[in-house]
Amino acid sequence: MAMADTKDEIHSPDTSDDQLKFRDPLISGLDASDGEMESLSLDASARSEPSVSRSSSLMANLSRYDDCLDDETRDLFVVVDDPEKHTSTLEAYVTFRITSKTTRSEFDDSQYQVRRRYNDFLWLRQKLEESYPTHLVPPLPEKHSLRRLDRFSPEFLKVRQQALQKFLTRLADHPVLSFDKNFQVFLTAKAWEFQAHKKHGTGILSRMSDSIHNISASYMMKNRSPEFTLIYEYVQTFAEKLGVIDRISQRIVKEQTDYVLEMCEWGPIYTLWSNSEDQLTSPLLAMSRAVDVCAQALKETIESTEDNFSQPLKEYILYTDAIKAVLRRRDAIQMEYETTVDELNRKKDEREQVKISDQTYSIGAFLGKDPEDVKQQKQDKLEQQIEELTKKMEVLNDRTVCADTDLRVDMERWHKNKQKDLKELFIESADRQILYYEKCLKAWEDAVRAIQAKDVLQDVPESQVTETSPNNTSSEDRGDTMEESSTTSEPHEGGTNSEPSV
């Protein structure tokens, strides 16, 4: 099957229940699903409005161009959507629908659809770290985070879905991790099959032992390669910078939230004031509308900042922790290699000492053995140990070289993705600020026009107003008419009074 056909078909695969729209949930939002389980579909109105600036349009075009190039080489597509809440007697949890489409021969079918919960994602990441300790496994979002929102709220699930989508997309694009057997089971196995597969795992004590060993290796290692020392220092500095940006961003969001509350109290004051000022009603209402528009625009900016700026920053902070963990595992391999080399050199020195030593006064000689036989036995034992250590050293040397290569390649891929993601993040943040100030500018310009229009009406002379009004007549005209009416009515009244009485 050609990849072009795969790309076309993936947008509208046929399912037995309904027509599944296979699209990027980061752009289109979530689909509502009908079923027995409670569906937590997200409102489409919650999607962020597209920016009108030229920079965002250019970035969107470049992103679509890059996506088209990537789609031509991809052979595995994964989409996360449709969160559902499940309630049992013991717990309540949320599952996400995972739809995958592939042309790989390792899969029995070309399309799969399963449901997985957050703990299943944790299991997958743990298995990948155990199987590929020197590869950089993408991080998962923290289980309980995101402004202390309810974990069943649409806002929380929207951000959680985006993070899980990014996690699986990074795995699907990885040239090694995407071919892992556990990843294939995660994407294809039915619920009961997947649970049975999860039970065959490494014990917690073994994982804790490996973790302690890796941490101690970083401190006991004699000399780390300068290349990886620079990587560690860069990651440490990078994490500190992101942490500072995140903390300042959170303070700004807090100040903006307080500002929104003040504006929500400020706007109604103008409305109440307009009830007692007949001549200033229109200007006061214009001020109230402008304040309300600015408050709503800032509220939308705060929500978008939390979802589209703070969360990606936290993801890369978690990424730095993952890189440090890989460096520790890589250091453990190098430390084991260096320890083996030191032991091998010690055994070789001991062998040389045995060759020139006199075993006449050795313990074996006191027990009645021939000193030459004791010497030969020691030499044979050392030769066997040296041979075993030499083989172990070669294996560990190969592991060290492979670990260095794996980490080096993954870091190169990480730097490339980081540059792309951060550029998009900063451009989106700039567009968000531009959109906010454009809304505020328009609101205040409308307010100024409304106030000036009222002033123009008040400045027009009264004579011009009466002349231009077709339904009004001047006071002089009204006076003449009244005089003519009175003159006309006088003879009539006189004639009536002059008639003789009957």
Image (cartoon, rainbow, N blue to C red):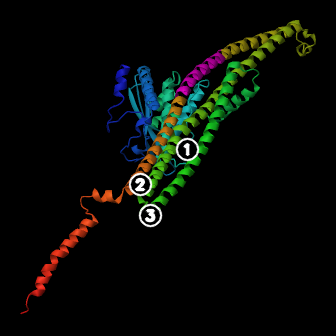
Q: Is residue 179 above or below residue 349?
A: below
Badge 2 element: helix
Specify which label sits upstream in the sequence, 2 or 3. 3
Residue 302 vs 455, above or below: the answer is: above
* In magenta segment, residue 60: no
User: Picture coordinates of residue 444 (x, y %)?
Assistant: 46, 48
Q: Which mark is residue 146?
A: 1
Q: Is residue 105 above or below residue 317?
A: above
Nearer to us: label 3 or label 1? 3
Of residues 131 and 391, the one nearer the viewer is: 131
- Viewer-nearest of labels 2 and 3? 2
Q: What secondary structure is marked by label 1?
A: loop
* Marks 1/2: CA–CA distance: 49 Å
Give the residues drawn in magenta, as a range: 398-420
Task: Residue 277: give its label.
Answer: 3
- What residue lies at 11% left-to-right and 84% top-to-bottom? 496
* Horizontal arrangement in the rendering, residue 485 relative to residue 173 (left or right): left
Find residue 97 and report its image quarter.
Answer: top left
Q: Residues within 10 Å of mark 1 (few under 14, many from 20)?
A: some
User: Mark 1 or mark 3, which is nearer the start of the sequence?
Assistant: 1
Three-letter amino acid code of the residue under disc 3: Glu
Work out whether residue 83 or residue 470 is closer to the camera in this orientation and state it: 470
Amino acid type, residue under disc 1 in the picture: Leu
Q: Which mark is residue 251?
A: none
Which class describes the residues within 10 Å of circle 2: few (<14), some (14-19), or many (20+)? some
